[in-house]
Image (cartoon, rainbow, N blue to C red):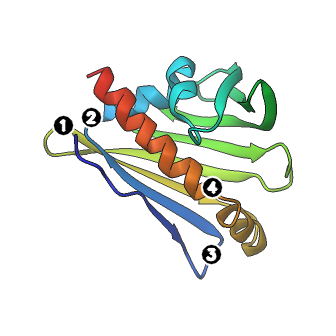
Amino acid sequence: MTKHETQILADEKVPTIEILREFDAAPEQVYRAHVDPELYAQWIGPRSLTTRIIRWDARTGGSWAFANDRGGEEVASFYGSFHEVRPNERIVWTFTYEGLPDGVALETLTFEELEGGRTRLRTLSVVQDFETRDGILSSGMDVGVNEGYDKLDELLAKNA
């Protein structure tokens, strides 16, 4: 298994965050890890937290919610709606941190098939303004993204 670098990019002209990451697994596997709540809970977020799924209806028009716990105590919770779920190709959802309910992001995830049975995951998050975007970027989200994707690599290798 190759260690892939995660790119986190902020556009200077629009309040977006783009995250690019390649995985040594087929799009179907990477997609499934995003829509199956048992799999999602195993890899999302930093290693110092566990994820507890509260609600998960991964279909167009469905909704989701999860909480992050440390030592049995809830430290953060998130929720949103699935706007479009296109199997193995694309997910469009809203993503909201309960501590900042006005900072909702509209995220589009695309699962691009690469040679050799690999996948490029592209996530584009659009937020209402640069202040919100910059707050997300400075929150330590890069640790959660990087550690989460490393855990996803491990999960995909285990389930290969």
Q: Amino acid at mark 3?
A: Val
In contact (CB < 8 Å): disc 3 and disc 1 = no
**Residue corresponding to mark 3:** 14
In front: label 4 or label 1? 4
Few, some or many residues within 10 Å of mark 1 (<14, 14–19, 20+): few
N-terminal-most mark, 4 or 3: 3
The quadrant in which the C terminus is found is: top left
Give the SS element for disc 4.
helix
Residue 146: image x %, image y %? Answer: 48, 51
Labelled disc at residue 25: 2
Name the residue that disc number 4 marks. 141
Sequence-wise, the earlier of marks 4 and 2 is 2
Q: Nearer the viewer, residue 148 or 59?
A: 148
The quarter holding residue 56 reads top right
| Residue 52 shows in the view | yes
Foreground mark, 3 or 1, reads 1
Label 2 – label 1 distance at C-alpha: 6 Å
In this view, the residue in front, 137 or 31, is: 137
